[in-house]
Amino acid sequence: MTTTTDATTGTIASLNDKYRQAWGVYPNAKVVMTDGISNLPDAKRSKVFEAVQQFKDFNEDNDPHGEHDFGSIEVPGVNDKVFWKFSYYDLSMDWGSEYPEDASKTVRVLTIMMAWEY
């Protein structure tokens, strides 16, 4: 793993925010969900998606590396916490990306799950 600088961390956070807030718009980005999210009723699943996209409450406790790559949220009507997490892959999706700050060399996968599935 390479050491990141503040500028690199800022770039990663910016890309993660951008991709999390606008699904399906950017190349090299995918959103997946676990069975726990998939099995929610449509209205609840929609609220989960909206909450993930609108999340802004990053702080030292939940974002110690400053990359905006993870969130834990409570969604009204959903009986458990919801987690979301970015993973970074190379373009073939065979390996982890060595360059998560470079959108042209990295596929971002946003996984949304119920906390109990973690």
Image: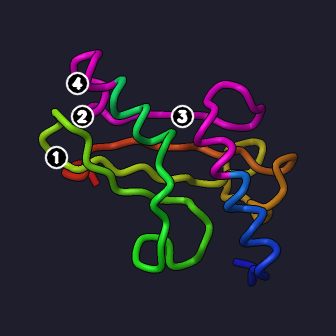
State the CA–CA distance, disc 1 to disc 4.
12 Å
* Helix, strand or loop at mark 2: helix
Tell me which numbered mark, 3 or 1, is placed earlier along the sequence. 3
Tell whether label 2 touches label 4 (CB within 8 Å).
yes
- Asked if 105 appears above or below 49 in the picture, the reply is below
Tell me which numbered mark, 1 or 2, is placed earlier along the sequence. 2
The answer to which of 50 and 4 lies nearer the viewer is: 50
Give residue 36's mark.
2
Give residue 80's mark.
1
Kindly identify the amino acid type of the residue bearing the numbered disc 3: Val
- Asked if 94 appears above or below 8 in the picture, the reply is above
State the CA–CA distance, disc 1 to disc 2.
10 Å
Tell me which numbered mark, 3 or 2, is placed earlier along the sequence. 3
Kindly identify the amino acid type of the residue bearing the numbered disc 2: Gly
The answer to which of 12 and 77 lies nearer the viewer is: 77
Kindly identify the amino acid type of the residue bearing the numbered disc 4: Leu
* Helix, strand or loop at mark 4: loop
Q: Is residue 61 magenta?
A: no
Tell me which numbered mark, 3 or 4, is placed earlier along the sequence. 3
Give residue 45's mark.
none
Tell whether label 1 touches label 3 (CB within 8 Å).
no
Which residue is pictured at 77% across the width and 32% down the height?
Answer: 27
State the CA–CA distance, disc 3 to disc 4.
16 Å
Specify whether 115 is left or right of 32.
left
Start-end of magenta stretch: 16-45
Tell me which numbered mark, 1 or 4, is placed earlier along the sequence. 4
